[in-house]
Amino acid sequence: MAHRKGARTNDEATPAWRLEGAFAPDGGKFYRALVENAGDILTLLDRDGTILYQSPAMREVLGYDGAAFIGTPVCDGVHPEDRERVRARILECAQKPEWISMETFRLPHLDGSWRWMEARAKNLLNDPDVGAILCVSRDVTEARRLEHQLQQAERLARFGYWRWVKGEPAPIWSEGVSKILDRSPRDMPRGGDWYRELIHPDDHDILLSKFLDAFDSNEQVTSVARFLAGDGTFRYIKTHAYAEADARHEVGALVGLAEDVTEEMRAQEAMKVSEAKYRLLAEQATDIIHHIAPDSSMIYLSPSVKVVLGYTPEDFAGQKGAGAFVHPDDLARLSAGYRDFVLSRAMLRFEYRFRHKNGHYVWLETTMRAVRDEAGKLTEIVGITRDTSERKKHEIEMMEARERAEAASRTKSRFLANMSHELRTPLNAIIGFSEMLKLEMFGKLGHARYVEYAQLINESGGLLLDLISDILDMSKIEAGKYELHREPINVSEAIGSALKLMYGRAEESGLALTTAICTGAASTVIFADERALKQILLNLLSNAVKFTQPGGRIIVGADATGSGIRFRVTDTGRGIPKEQIPRLAQPFEQVSTDAELAKQGTGLGLALVRSLAELHGGSIRIESEVGRGTTVTVDIPTNETPALFQAAK
Ligand code: ADP
């Protein structure tokens, strides 16, 4: 097995732990120490995926005793959702001698959690000394979590994304972009004349030349151009494009962000792109194994150092420490960590930049493990180093993209808040004065048409004011600036006052509006923001009225749930197709087939209900059946009433 002797020469394709030569002083013992003390898990599999050997690092990484799994199929432990993929990968690997493959999957930790592992497998079945598939696995859970958070942040910022690979005829558009443009992703042009199809004729030359410049100059370009939307109109789309260099620092693609207010699928698209990138970088990575003496001199270095850093192992013979190669900005942190590790710690992992033989810096991640004698004295250090430059570059890119997205989102919220304020003031004058005209407060207008027009101005002003208030509320919530003014509220009174405002509209639309408040709820006092609660009920009621045919019924209910109140608005209206429900509580989302009715709304109603409920620690649920009706339930927790308000209860 791992420590068996064999007469071989150094060869880059040969796993480092099998190598012997100038830097391997004592054959078997040496390799056993190397394998058993590596921080990553080394596993040997037979061609069916049965575990033949498991290194002791298993205990450190996953808490289990590796020896216990010998003789069992490796796939048994893998997360059920990843199992088939891993099984197929092992079978594929078993078919191809010397083949190297990379896979990420989940394994259980003794503490009950699932850990994401990144494993590199090499088929050495035909190697007479090994006769197995060798896997080196490491825990990448933290990196996956970071990636997921970035995706979430981008989803919240609602942007479109595109990538134009040099030499390809057209950019690849994320779904976010097609969404901004109201097109189906299949309608996005892909041919060499994409810009003629997509961009206003007056804009495409300049946009194209800017993009081409960015390919050459490596600088970020921002541009505004008119893009043709699915409905035949042009929209102004602002794109920030920047060049993306490959590992050789050559620009390989242009990447861009397009501003968006409705995008929600883009995150998935970005996820796919980033996963593909991770896979690519992982498949190209080659780990370096090193063995260091207590005085920091290099005893052994695997030949893969040539692939990653351009040096041969001999270049480091007798070298003490690697400080001279480490990036000056990383050196102090690294030296401090290393000193600490040598003195007392068992394991060290760090990321740093190392100077390649060609002069540029490469991001590396090294895991070191200290081997100590019984007295605790350091006897040797075993390390595994992986080239993480692609991953790092991608992380930095994502970080920058997120910062840009967040800055744009903050600007948008500030702009909306200011605009809404500026618009409200004149609107109030329009509404107030048209009201006076309508009522002919200071004398006759003279012609019935004038009264009618004054009424129209008044109604339109009212609608506009509602819309602006919704936008303002939404942008406040998104900017985290919406403050709740909680006070004790009696549930039936809150429902009563919302109903009072809706009876007129319900009657005009020929609808019966009734309540069903259970006794437990009627007397309950919740501690909530009165204006927000009223807005929740009014938004739900006005949707019910809007989407229910004359003759229908609307019931407003409330039940006590133990921890709070469940408000319910049920209608017998047109209903909502199942597949559309999940996206309706996002801002600006409407049922796509409701073209006529959609004009009467903005798609903000349900989004506000959801956000306001969530601000209270509550939630919203939409249940609906097409043609039968809709029930929207909103749970609002009672919330602890502070002593000050106890008397009011
Ligand atoms: P708006 O009503 O302003 O368009 P909302 O966020 O309140 O925005 O609603 C979004 C969409 O959800 C509506 O356009 C409509 O298609 C659908 N919808 C909401 N409530 C109902 C309901 N009670 N019955 C049928 N469809 C509804």
Image (cartoon, rainbow, N blue to C red):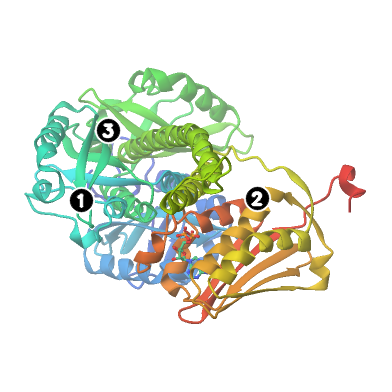
Residue occupied by mark 2? 532
Kind of residue at disc 2: Ala
Disc 2 crowd rating (10 Å Cα; few below 14, some 14-19, many 20+) is: many
Q: Are marks 2 and 3 in contact (CB under 8 Å)?
A: no
Image quarter of the N terminus: bottom left
Q: Secondary structure at mark 3?
A: helix
- The image position of residue 562, as x and y in percent, is 79, 66
Is residue 303 visible in the rendered structure shown here? Answer: no
| Rendered image: mark on residue 172 | 1
Q: Are marks 1 and 3 in contact (CB under 8 Å)?
A: no
Residue at 65%, 40% (x, y): give it. Answer: 483
Marks 1 and 2 sit apart, C-alpha to C-alpha, by 42 Å
Q: Residue furthest right?
A: 647
Disc 1 crowd rating (10 Å Cα; few below 14, some 14-19, many 20+) is: some
Name above or below for residue 379 compared with residue 584.
above
Instruction: Answer yes or no: disc 2 within 8 Å of ligand 1.
Output: no
> Looking at the image, is mark 1 or mark 3 earlier in the sequence?
1
Image quarter of the C terminus: bottom right
Residue occupied by mark 3? 313
Kind of residue at disc 3: Pro
| Number of marks drawn | 3
Is residue 610 visible in the rendered structure shown here? Answer: yes
- The image position of residue 45, as x and y in percent, is 38, 65
